[in-house]
Image (spheres, rainbow, N blue to C red):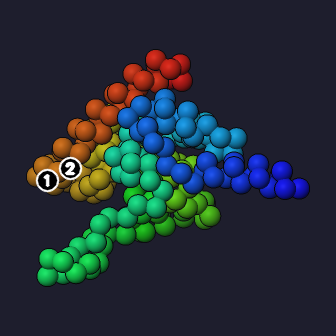
């Protein structure tokens, strides 16, 4: 009985830790290649369901959270030094806002989905990018514009107001670069 509990504990411990080598998606998938928690199989399943390539899904999560399950935006400071409120309700791997996460749960029927669960978060990212494709005609392989719509929201993206915010452009370019790097890495390790 002790042996079974020890093995179960080891399996679950791997689920809770963030990957340490995040600049190489093959290494990320190698680090998260568990029996119960296989990130590559989960991401590939989302690619099949929504048509968003694995490198774009992973680059989005890398940009949003660095693969940290419980990350939140930093608190603002009152008078420059007193920790105050957070600028948004973003949370988890995907940094999904409370309202957007509730929309996702309602539209997909995934009421038990959690932002701290990689499988749920990567599925959310796929759903969101597919929604941006449907609403704004962004090709599913266009990492730059998919991320710009992810960051700005579909309405701001459609209005083009995000273009006056250089931070979005910079982050979308960086995400597109990461997606391109991840695509090459996946091809080299035979996962694509």
Q: Residue at x 76, y 48 (%)?
A: 7
Residue 60 location in percent, x, y? 38, 44
Q: Residue at x 37, y 64 (%)?
A: 72
Q: Helix, strand or loop at disc 1?
A: loop
How many circles with numbers are drawn on the protein? 2
- In the depicted structure, whether residue 91 falls above or below residue 126: below
Dot 2 crowding, Cα within 10 Å, few <14, some 14–19, many 20+: some
Residue 70 location in percent, x, y? 46, 61
Q: Nearer the viewer, residue 90 or 133?
A: 90
- In the depicted structure, whether residue 189 falls above or below residue 64: above
Residue 18 location in percent, x, y? 49, 49
State the image quarter where residue 154 is shown: bottom left
In the picture, the disc for residue 165 is 1
Do labels 1 and 2 touch, CB within 8 Å?
Answer: yes
In the picture, the disc for residue 121 is none
Residue under pointer 2: 168
Q: Residue at x 50, y 60 (%)?
A: 115
Q: Could one spot residue 13 in this view of the protein?
A: yes
Q: Nearer the viewer, residue 8 or 44?
A: 8
Dot 1 crowding, Cα within 10 Å, few <14, some 14–19, many 20+: few
How far apart are the alpha carbons under marks 1 and 2? 6 Å
Residue 39 location in percent, x, y? 57, 40
Q: Residue at x 63, y 45 (%)?
A: 37
Left or right of 80, for residue 91: right
- In the depicted structure, whether residue 18 falls above or below residue 88: above
- In the depicted structure, whether residue 88 falls above or below residue 167: below
Q: Could one spot residue 96 in this view of the protein?
A: no
Q: Nearer the viewer, residue 144 or 167?
A: 167
Quarter holding the N terminus is bottom right
């Amino acid at each position: 009985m002790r042996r079974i509990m020890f093995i179960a504990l080891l399996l679950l411990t791997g689920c809770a830790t963030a990957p340490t080598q995040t600049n190489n998606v093959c290494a990320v998938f190698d680090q998260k290649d568990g029996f119960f928690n296989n990130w590559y199989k989960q991401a590939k399943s989302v690619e099949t369901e929504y048509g968003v390539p694995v490198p774009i899904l992973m680059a989005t999560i890398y940009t949003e959270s660095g693969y940290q399950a419980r990350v939140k935006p930093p608190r603002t400071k009152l008078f420059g030094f007193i920790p105050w409120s957070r600028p948004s309700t973003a949370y988890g791997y995907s940094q999904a806002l409370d309202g957007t996460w509730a929309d996702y749960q309602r539209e997909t029927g995934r009421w038990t989905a959690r932002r701290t669960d990689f499988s749920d978060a990567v599925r959310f990212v796929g759903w969101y990018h597919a929604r941006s494709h449907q609403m704004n005609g962004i090709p599913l392989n266009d990492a730059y514009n998919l991320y710009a719509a992810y960051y700005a929201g579909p309405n701001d993206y459609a209005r083009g107001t995000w273009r006056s915010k250089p931070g979005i452009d910079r982050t979308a370019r960086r995400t597109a670069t990461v997606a391109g790097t991840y695509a090459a890495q996946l091809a080299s390790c035979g996962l694509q």
